[in-house]
Image (tube, helix red, strand yellow):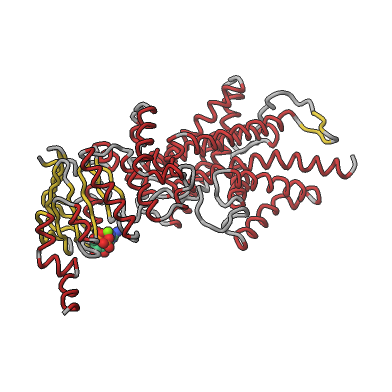
Amino acid sequence: MNLSDQLLQYILSGLSTGAIYALIGLGFAIIYNSTGIINFAQGEFVMFGGMLGVYFFHKQGLALPIAFLLAVVVTALCGVLFERFAIRPLRRPTPMNMVIITIGGSIFLRGVAMIAWGKDTHVLPTFSGDEPISFAGATLLPQHLWIFAITILLIIGTKLFFSHTISGKAMSACAVNRRAAGLVGIDVRRMIMFSFILSSAIGAMAGIIIAPLTMTSYDVGVMLGLKGFCAAIIGGMSSGLPTVIGGLLLGVLESLGAGFSSGYKDAVAFVILLLILFFRPQGLFSRGSSERV
Amino acid sequence: MELLKLKNINTYYNAVHALKNVSLHLGRGEIVTLIGANGAGKTTLLNTLSAVTPARTGEILYDQQRIEGCEPERIVELGISQVPEGRQVFKPLTVEDNLELGAYLRFRRRESRKVIRADLEEMYLLFPRLRERRKQLAGTLSGGEQQMLAIGRALMAKPKVLLLDEPSMGLAPLVVQEIFGVIAALCRDKGTSILLVEQNAKAALKLADRGYVLETGKVILSGVASELLDNPEVQRAYLGKEKKEIWEN
Ligand SMILES: Nc1ncnc2c1ncn2[C@@H]1O[C@H](COP(=O)(O)OP(=O)(O)OP(=O)(O)O)[C@@H](O)[C@H]1O
Ligand SMILES: [Mg+2]
C-alpha cells in the first residue's frame, strides 16, 4: 500500500466514524436549541441504542431490522422518560443545575445498563456481510456504506423536518423565542419533549449502526458522547450542516492522528474541543452572530 | 355586547403587585386603548389576558365564559391573540414561516391547508411589503416591517380579539399611520375587537372608541376616547399639552 492509498484509507474510515459523531452531535444540538440544555446523557442514548439492538437481536432472537426498530423506539421512550422525570420538574433551572442533572442522568442510565446487561462487550452482526469492497486502492466494509447511507438519510430527514413541517418550524420557533412561541399557541413543553424524542432516536440509530464495527458495552456512551459534543461545538451547536461537517472533520482528524500513533486518537477530540472553546466559541463556521437554529 | 371583561384582576411578580383590582371590558368590534406611563402595568395586563402571567385573583370573562385558568395555547385557540411588545418575530425564520406559525394551532387542528394558504395570501394583500420579502429572514426586516409581520402572524390565528402592545414603538410617523390604518380597517371590515396598548396617547385616543388610563397598576380614568382626549389630566400627564402651552406663552 503506498502513501496516498494509505491516506485515503484513513480518510474513509475517519469519515465513517465521523458520520457517527455527526449524528450524536445533531442530538446535542437539537436539544440545546429547543431548551438551552447541553444534554450530557446524549452518549447514553447512543449506548442504549447499541445495547438494546444487541438485546433484541441476540437475547430475543428477533430479525435484525426488527431489533433495530425496537431499539430505536425503546431508546426514544427512555428519552421521553428522561425529559419527563429529570428535566421537566425543574421549573427555573440554572445552567449549573442542568449540567448536574444531565450528568447525573447519564451516570444513572449507565448504571441501569450495567445492571441489566453486565460489563461485557457485545457485538452485532454487520447488516450485509463482511466482504470488503475495494475503492481506489482503499478497502471499505459494506457496513461503512450502511453508515454513510443511514447518516445521509437522517441528515436529510432532519433538515426536511425543520424546514418543511409545521412541527419542525414550531421547534425552531421555540428555540429562538420561547415567549413568542407560546403566544402563537405553540405548546413549548411538548416541543421540548419532541426534541428529546428526536435526539434519543437519532442517537440510538448511531449506536446501532456503529455497533457491528466497534462493539458496544455499557460504557461506550462516555466517549461517543464526548466526540458528539465536540462535533456540535465545532458546528456552533447548529442542528444542521455545520455540526455534520464538525463530526466528519473530527472523525478524519482522529483517524489521521491514529495513523501516527494510536495513543493520539482520543486526544484529538479534547484538543479540538479546547481550541474551539478558546478561540471560536461560536463554532468554526459561524460568522460571529449568535443567531442560530 | 361585551366580548371580554376583566373583573378585579390582581397580578403579581412575586412580591411586586403589578395590577391592582383592574376591571375593564371590550365590546364586539370595539377599539379600546390602554394608555399609561412606563411601568404602569400595560404589558402585564396583556400578558395576564394571554395567560403568560396569570392573575392571582379576579375573573376574566370571554364570551360569558371564565377563562382565567386557561393555558396560553387555549387562549389563542379561543380567539385572543397578542402582538407582543417589541414585535418578537422569529428572526432566523423566513417571513412566510413566521406567518405560517401564526396558524400553528389551525395546522394542529388539521384545518385545510388551502384555507390557511388563502389567509396567507390575505396577509400579503394587507401588507404587500411582506409578500416581496416572503423568503427573507424576519431578522433582516426593518422595524416597521417586523411590526407588520408580528401583526400578520397574530392575525393568522383568526382572532376575534387582537391585543396590541405598543405597535408604534420606535417607528416613523408615516409607518405608524400605516399600521394604525390597518388596525382601523381590521375592526371595520372584519369586526375584530382590539385592545391597543400605547404610549402614543394622542394617536391611540384618536383611533379608539374608548380608553383606559393605567397608573402604577390601577385604572385611574376611563371613558369615551374623545372625552379622554379633552380631559385636562390626560392632557397634562400623557399629551404634554400644558407644558406646550406654557412654553407657547
Ligand atoms: N418579570 C418581571 N418581574 C418583576 N417585575 C416585573 C416584571 N415585569 C414587569 N415587572 C414590573 O411590573 C410593573 C409593570 O410592568 P409592565 O411591563 O407591565 O409595564 P408597562 O406599562 O408595559 O411599561 P412600558 O410602557 O415600559 O412597557 C413594573 O413596575 C415592572 O417593574
Ligand atoms: Mg410594556
Q: Residue at x 57, y 57 (%)?
A: A282
Total labels: the figure holds: 0
Considering depth in this image, is B104 or A73 the residue closer to the camera? B104
Please name the residue shown 38% across and 35% down the image: B121
Can residue A223 be seen here? The reply is yes
User: Foreground residue, B69 or A85?
Assistant: B69
**Residue A84 in the image: x percent, y percent?**
39, 40
Horizontal arrangement in the rendering, residue B24 relative to residue A129 (left or right): left
Question: Percent x, y for residue B11?
Answer: 19, 55
- Left-right relation of B173 to A254: left
Name, please, the residue furthest toward the right. Answer: A2
Residue B136: x percent and y percent? 49, 46
Q: Position of residue A168 (x, y in %)?
A: 46, 37
Image quarter in which the C terminus of chain B is found: bottom left
Q: Viewer-proximal residue, B152 or B108?
A: B152
The answer to whether residue A222 is visible is no
Identified at 33% across, 38% down, the residue is: B156
Q: Residue furthest front?
A: B249
> Relative to A239, is B229 above or below?
below
* The N terminus of chain B sits in image quarter: top left
Quarter of the image where ligand 2 sits: bottom left
Q: Nearer the viewer, residue A188 or A21?
A: A188
